[in-house]
Image: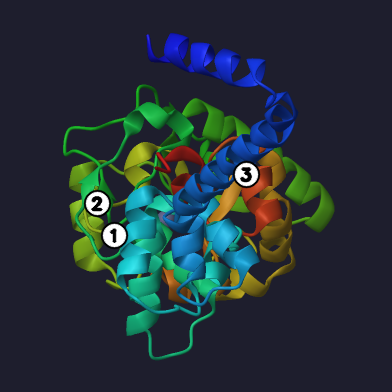
């Protein structure tokens, strides 16, 4: 009805000698409309995460990146701090940044008094779940990629679906492991022998929950895991030295020890507790402990220079 009335009014008005005014009036109306639209867009932008972060003092490019990465809740909490945080932007640029851990990285950095590199902070938070250290059951459905550590435990009753005995030629007492692990070990030891003339030997492979209790009780607690937290219960881990260097220390620096660390990924194994991550992960360096994860994953972990814990957190767990 109103539109009809306006039409009638315009008709009557332009019918009189006001026709020349029609064009300027239309232009003016358009300009008013444009100003209104722009004002609305301005208000929307002013309240956007990008602009709110920018107003805290972040350069525009950083504000844009932060806004695109963070959830609304995370942007709200960043803005609620009311000040610029110097690591907020660098942390989202870290290779293994996980969005859901954003606040934890900032909190960890604030508590750190050692000047730890951001990449280490990301690694520690990703694998430890800082500040929530609660232990959870291992997801055995992940198969050869299942994660067992101080935070992910196996049930008392867990045992691998299938275990095969390793030939006594390659171990000092009866040892068992999952079939794929034994097959991969046989291929690896054969090539190691061909190239270094040394014979790799399995010192320990599958250990049941009960056996692990005994192992923990009689060993150095820096190296031994508690029952339920040992990878040996999966049947996917092997402790290896050689016939020529049966002691762990000398094996570490022996030709075959070096060869094994450099080539084991090609057979699906990773060095589970490497030297450079011992501080970050809280495990001591174990040059003898290999973990089977399959060739594809082993090569990726080797190429990226990360631990299974970091790989698991970044690639296999829900990142949200
Ligand atoms: Zn071991």
- Which dot marks residue 225? 1
Ranked by sequence position, the earlier of labels 3 and 2 is 2
**Callout 2–callout 1 Cβ contact below 8 Å:** yes
Instruction: Say what secondary structure mark 1 lies in.
Output: loop
**Percent x, y for residue 189?**
68, 45
Lateral position of residue 201 relative to residue 108, left or right: right
Q: Is residue 242 visible?
A: no
Q: Which residue is mark 3?
A: 298
Looking at the figure, which quarter contains the N terminus? Answer: top left
Q: Nearer the viewer, residue 28 or 219?
A: 28
Dot 1 surroundings within 10 Å: few (below 14), some, or many (20 or more)?
many
- Which dot marks residue 140? none
Instruction: Say what secondary structure mark 3 lies in.
Output: helix
Q: Residue at x 39, y 15 (%)?
A: 2
Q: Is residue 90 visible?
A: yes
Instruction: Report the mark closest to the observer, 2 or 1.
Output: 1
Residues at marks 3 and 1, CA–CA distance in whole angstroms: 23 Å
Dot 2 surroundings within 10 Å: few (below 14), some, or many (20 or more)?
many
Instruction: Report the mark closest to the observer, 3 or 2.
Output: 3
Q: Residue at x 58, y 50 (%)?
A: 270
Residues at marks 3 and 2, CA–CA distance in whole angstroms: 26 Å
Q: Which residue is mark 2?
A: 212
Instruction: Say what secondary structure mark 2 lies in.
Output: helix
């Amino acid at each position: 009805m109103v539109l009809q009335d306006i039409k009638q009014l315009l008709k009557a008005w332009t019918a009189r000698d006001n026709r020349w005014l029609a064009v300027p009036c239309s232009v003016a109306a358009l300009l008013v409309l444009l100003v209104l639209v722009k004002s609305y867009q301005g208000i929307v932008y002013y309240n956007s995460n990008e602009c709110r972060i920018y107003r805290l003092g972040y350069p525009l490019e950083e504000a844009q990146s932060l806004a695109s990465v963070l959830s609304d809740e995370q942007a709200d909490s960043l803005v609620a701090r009311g000040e610029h945080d110097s690591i907020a932007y660098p942390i989202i640029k870290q290779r293994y940044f996980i969005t859901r851990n954003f606040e934890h990285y900032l909190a960890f950095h604030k508590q750190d008094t050692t000047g730890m590199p951001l990449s280490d902070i990301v690694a520690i938070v990703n694998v430890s779940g800082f500040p929530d250290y609660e232990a959870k059951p291992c997801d055995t459905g992940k198969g050869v990629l299942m994660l067992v550590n101080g935070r992910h435990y196996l049930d008392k009753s867990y045992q691998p679906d299938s275990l095969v005995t390793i030939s006594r030629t390659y171990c000092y007492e009866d040892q068992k492991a999952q079939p794929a692990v034994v097959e991969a070990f046989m291929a690896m030891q054969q090539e190691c022998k061909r190239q270094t003339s040394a014979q790799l030997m399995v010192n320990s492979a599958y250990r049941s929950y009960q056996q692990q209790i005994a192992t923990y009780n009689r060993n150095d607690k820096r190296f031994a895991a508690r029952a339920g937290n040992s990878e040996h219960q999966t049947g996917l881990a092997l402790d290896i030295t050689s016939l020529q260097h049966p002691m762990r220390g000398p094996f570490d620096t022996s030709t075959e020890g070096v060869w094994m660390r450099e080539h084991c990924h090609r057979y699906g194994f990773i060095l589970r507790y490497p030297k450079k991550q011992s501080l970050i992960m809280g495990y001591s360096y174990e040059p003898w402990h290999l973990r089977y994860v399959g060739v594809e994953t082993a090569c990726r972990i080797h190429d990226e220079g990360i631990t299974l814990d970091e790989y698991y957190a970044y690639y296999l767990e829900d990142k949200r």
